[in-house]
Image (spheres, rainbow, N blue to C red):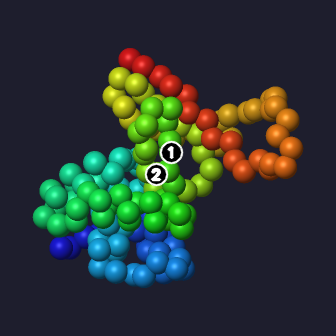
Amino acid sequence: MDMKINSHITRALNNLKKSPLKVTKQRTTLIEILFKNGDHHFTAEEVYKEVNKNKYEISLATIYNCLNQFTKHEILKSVRLSSDKVYFDTNTAGHHHFFCKSTEKLSDIKFSDVKISNLPKIPKGKKLESIEIVVNITD
Ligand SMILES: [Zn+2]
């Protein structure tokens, strides 16, 4: 399949090479599909549909595994909502999200667009890792 390589794909493939994961045809194909449209958010089921549409045969379980491995090695980021839905995000830099409950879509909020003026004291023995906010919206 002739797929245009863009800078997002190149960056993700470089991250894959730097990770301990083996560079396989399957992982490369998934990266090309996931990153071809730049920054966006998706669920494993959506990836599964997209993969099938492109006539690749990758099972949903394998896709879940790959997405989780990619997340572990910071090729992707995951966004967990209060519901049990997990979204994956090709934008791995720190940022916040709008989540529209009507359309079930996530969209990015620039990190610098949110100012946090008051934080509770971090529990003893713990350290702050990140703050990522989901702003729930609806139609
Ligand atoms: Zn995002």
In the displayed structure, 122 sits above or below 13; it is: above
Q: Amino acid at mark 2?
A: Asp
Upstream in sequence: badge 1 or badge 2: 1
x, y percent for residue 96 = 58, 40
Say what secondary structure mark 1 lies in.
strand
- Asked if the residue at tag 2 contacts the one at tag 1, i.e. Cβ–Cβ closer than 8 Å, the answer is yes
Quadrant where the N terminus is found in the figure: bottom left
How many marks the image carries: the answer is 2
In the displayed structure, 52 sits above or below 16; it is: above
- In the image, 84 versus 51, the foreground residue is 84
**Quadrant of the rendered image containing residue 48:** bottom left
Is residue 7 visible in the rendered image? The answer is no
Residue at image location 75% in from the left, 32% down from the top: 116
**Callout 1: 10 Å neighbours few (<14), some, many (20+)?**
many
The residue singled out by tag 2 in the image is 89
The residue singled out by tag 1 in the image is 79
x, y percent for residue 72 = 53, 63
Label 2 residue near ligand 1, CB within 8 Å: yes
Residue furthest toward the front? 125
Say what secondary structure mark 2 lies in.
strand
**Callout 2: 10 Å neighbours few (<14), some, many (20+)?**
many
Residue at image location 38% in from the left, 63% down from the top: 65
State left or right for residue 77 relative to residue 123.
left
In the displayed structure, 84 sits above or below 137; it is: below
Residue at image location 60% in from the left, 45% down from the top: 95
Label 1 residue near ligand 1, CB within 8 Å: yes
Residue at image location 80% in from the left, 50% down from the top: 127
